[in-house]
Amino acid sequence: MTAPLVLVHGFWHGSWCWSEVLPHVVAAGRRAVAVDLAGHGLHARRPGWFVGRSASPEAVSTDVSPVAEVTLDDAAELLTSQVERVGGGGPVTVVAHSAAGPVLTRVAQRTPELVAHAVYLSAYMPASGVPAVAYTRMPESADGRVAPLLRDDPARTGALRLDLATDDPGYRHRLYEAFYGDVDPVLADAATGLLTPDGPLGIMLGTTTLTDAGWGSTRRTYVVCAKDLAVRPALQAKLVAEADAAFPHNPTSVVTLDASHSPFLSMPEEVAEVITPLG
């Protein structure tokens, strides 16, 4: 029997973002489930300023996040438990979007027997010992649209924070451009309403030492989003090149979508066509 698919969203999103993809996958006869990343979805905790207990402008930039203690270890432990449950202890194919990439990498390194195929959808796929956050500071990320949206000092608050309570139309338009540039505006507006403001900085700070017997032995596919303004195509190419240089015996398969950062909303059928055969 083909391994089930486990779909993992990126920062600020939730398992809901796969709702347009899942029907196509299931209709093709593949078992699949979407799960929440640590600090997100049903595991999210919203800061006081966002829920109205503290409404001062300063609080947006200074309130310590309720998910500040979430680490890459925590996220990997949660995803491992989800994978074990879905697969019944057997291997599954994991599709990770954006900042879920380093979590998938940690799980595949520690328990490669649980990951039949690691799929990175415009995701951070960090090299051995390199934190994902380092890639946001590289030249390949210089023109990314997410960093200017952040509304805090991550070292102080413990989170990468979006000001989702703002009524500034310019900010909201820039958020739309960064994440949903080719998504129908009505659908993008609905998705924006489901975002949570804080992404745990600890997930981006953690590192994983990669080995031939661990992550290096796992089959992997990278799905490039050619119009991505969040994880830029040049950075996506760098991530693939680094992985292939480190593990040339197990090269990365690459598929390209002519999409922005959120193809699960702009072209869900095409995403399903890519990931459904990967076992």
Image: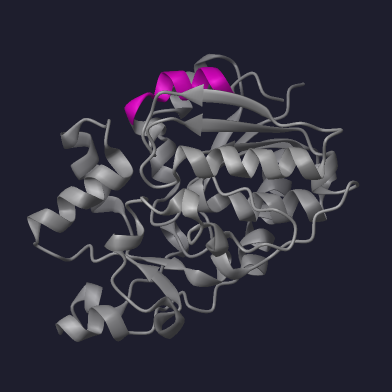
Residue 86 left/right relative to 173 = right
Residue 193 left/right relative to 240 = left
Q: Is residue 202 above or below residue 259?
A: below
Judging depth in this view, the residue of 279 and 61 nearest the camera is 61
Q: Which residue shows up at 16% across the image and 48% down it?
A: 173
Question: Quarter of the image holding residue 16?
Answer: top left
Give the residue furthest to the top.
Answer: 28
Give the residue furthest to the right.
Answer: 213
Q: Which residue shows up at 40% across the image and 23% down it?
A: 258
Residue 202 in the image: state x and y as whole percent: 55, 71
Residue 26 visible (yes or no): no
Indicate yes or no whether the magenta region holds residue 201.
no
Q: Quadrant of the C terminus?
A: top right
Residue 8 in the image: state x and y as whole percent: 54, 45
Q: Which residue shows up at 63% across the image and 66% down it?
A: 72
Q: Quadrant of the N terminus?
A: top right
Question: Quarter of the image holding residue 151?
Answer: bottom left
Residue 93 in the image: state x and y as whole percent: 68, 34
Residue 29 visible (yes or no): yes
Chief secondary structure of the magenta span? helix
Describe the colour scheme in one phrase: one colour
Residue 19 in the image: state x and y as whole percent: 40, 34
- Residue span colored magenta: 266-275
Judging depth in this view, the residue of 73 and 233 nearest the camera is 233
Judging depth in this view, the residue of 278 and 239 nearest the camera is 239
